[in-house]
Amino acid sequence: MKYFILLFFFPVLLISCFSPQPPEPVHPLPSERQLAWHELEFYAFVHFNMNTFTNMEWGFGNESPELFNPTGLDTRQWARVCKEAGMKGIILTAKHHDGFCLWPSEYTEHSVKKSPWKNGEGDVVRELADACREYGLKFGVYLSPWDRNHPDYGRPEYITYFRNQLRELLTNYGEVFEVWFDGANGGTGWYGGANEERRIDRKTYYDWENTYKIVRELQPSACLFSDAGPDVRWVGNEEGWAMKTNWAPIRRDEFYPGSPNYAELRTGHEDGTHWVPAEVDVSIRPGWYYHPSEDHKVKTLPHLLDIYYNSIGRNASFLLNFPVDTCGLIHEKDVEQVMKLADAVKADFADNLALGKRVTATSIRGNSSKYKARNVTDGNPDTYWAADDNIIESSLEINFRKPTEMNRFLVQEDIRLGQRVKKFKLEALVDNGWHLIASETTIGRKRILRFPNVTASKLRLTIEDAKASPVISNIEVYHAPKILIEPEIRRNKNGLVSSYLPDQGRWNPGIIFNYEFFVSEDGNNWGAPVSSGEFSNIKNSPIWQEKRFEQVSGRFIKLRALSAAEENGRIGLAEFGIITD
């Protein structure tokens, strides 16, 4: 029997499964810890310390620990309020400039262990850290580099003390998400009884490079905040806003805690060398610490909403301060207003009109479905639309299929590939004609536009200029309801009634820092000042401050400015008054 082997040859069709490579990143890029920080967006500051009981903004350092005695301290109330308000964490002023420690530090007697609160056995830091864990909040610490109590401040020995306290806070209280270093450093203080002025070189004195290494060693996931970062930067004001142009990168080596060029922090740098995004820190009241006289000055809902949109909506985070009162609670009026804010934000972003809508683009990277235009409305933060390399000017068009009323537009870049967009515009198709809604600059991690109600069947986002081809991860569109608030009614002496909302601006040049105040019977013989000192934190928080002194009589008064809040700054005066009891 013969066997035959039949060989059949078939042509083979080779199909190329080419998929374009992702866009090259535009440096600098955020670290993993910074990406996690960006996701938090909204969290709380708590200023509660010795100043709460002395009714001051900056203590001098000579205050007795006996003064610290909250009658009903409840950190669980703080955590509950923050959680219900939609916040993701709390940063506590563990030690402010007066040097008083809210934990029983091993390295000083100027702490809660010498206070009558809980017979010296209390630890506010411990209680808040535990409360944050219970409510699923992140926990952060503020540790003032300046210490007006410590006798060695200004000398090398103080740096060892400062670092020892930093190690205590980072090893005894669990995970910390942010470590906050203030830029106020050096000046007058008690300093163990020296009662003098001590100036330091803010750039070199703390040896920041080696101080930061302690945080990296003990809390590798924690972001470091200061004027210069290195992870998160101050926004350059305490009023609650970032500029419309806001780059996450800055030229970091040009800054340090207390840098004089803080105005640049509001915008960042297009040519920044390091990723150091902005944090907007602002108090819900005029002052950072609790003052009974400010119970009627809690920020209104419209003001708080402005802060929200001018921080989170401008590529920054929102750090809202609660001045906890002498009982040890967030005051009921503060709670009321932050809950109004939470409800308003929830209502503003209740229904994403763009979710799942059809999107077209003028350029799709490699014509690949991986980078398709519809990725921006799929609700998935890990997908994005990208244009072809070297294509800067490009557009995305969202089709609502029918006329739709809207007044909010949210857009995000995929910042894992860097911040790219330098200029963009938004247009709406109304009655078959395109109308310009907004012309803006940067986007970054999140940009939110508010505009008057418009009824449109399509929206078009056009990237007009960028560092490289755009990469957009998300677009959302909303119709936010109108905010209705009860008017504040005031009646003048003639019985006429009007609604009143005071000007909330509080940034003015020519502010006095150190002063002397004199009283005279004849306007010629003045004698010694009846009051002298400083207007604490007046540079960044220019609010009304009262200075009280023993009762004197006279016909003439004189206020002498000894120094300005700004170094080599000018002196100015808007208004002052006399209080008589």
Image (cartoon, rainbow, N blue to C red):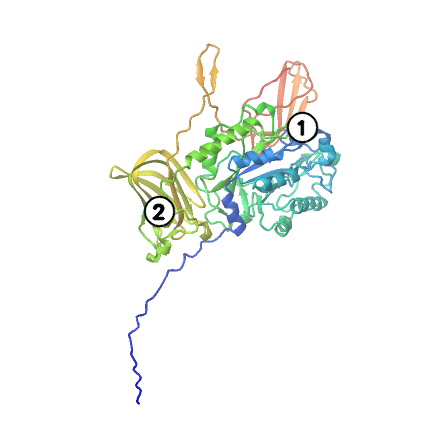
Report the amino acid beneath label 2.
Answer: Glu
Label drawn at residue 464: 2
Q: Identify the residue shown where x is 33% and y is 49%.
A: 394
Image quadrant for the N terminus? bottom left
Q: Residues within 10 Å of mark 1 (few under 14, many from 20)?
A: few
Q: Identify the residue shown where x is 74% and y is 37%.
A: 109
Label drawn at residue 71: 1
Which is nearer the eye, 265 or 79? 79
Report the amino acid beneath label 1.
Answer: Thr
Q: Position of residue 319 (x, y in %)?
A: 53, 38
Q: Identify the residue shown where x is 36% and y is 63%.
A: 18
Q: Which residue of the protein is positioned furthest toward the left in this rendering?
A: 432
Marks 2 and 1 sit apart, C-alpha to C-alpha, by 58 Å
Which is nearer the eye, 136 or 287? 136
Q: Is residue 402 left or right of residue 105?
A: left
Q: Position of residue 415 (x, y in %)?
A: 45, 49
- Label 2 with label 1: CB-CB less than 8 Å: no
Q: Residues within 10 Å of mark 2 (few under 14, many from 20)?
A: some
Q: What element does badge 1 sit on? A: loop
Query: Which quadrant of the structure image shows residue 189?
Result: top right
Q: Does residue 83 appear in this view? A: yes
Which is nearer the eye, 302 or 421? 302
Q: Position of residue 504 (x, y in %)?
A: 49, 28
**Mark 1 or mark 2, which is nearer the start of the sequence?**
1
Q: What element does badge 2 sit on? A: strand
Q: Position of residue 77 (x, y in %)?
A: 59, 33
Image quadrant for the C terminus? top right
Query: Which quadrant of the structure image shows residue 537?
Result: top right
Relative to 80, residue 422 above or below: below
Q: Does residue 277 appear in this view? A: no
How many numbered badges does the structure rendering display? 2
Which-is-in-front pick, marks 2 and 1?
1
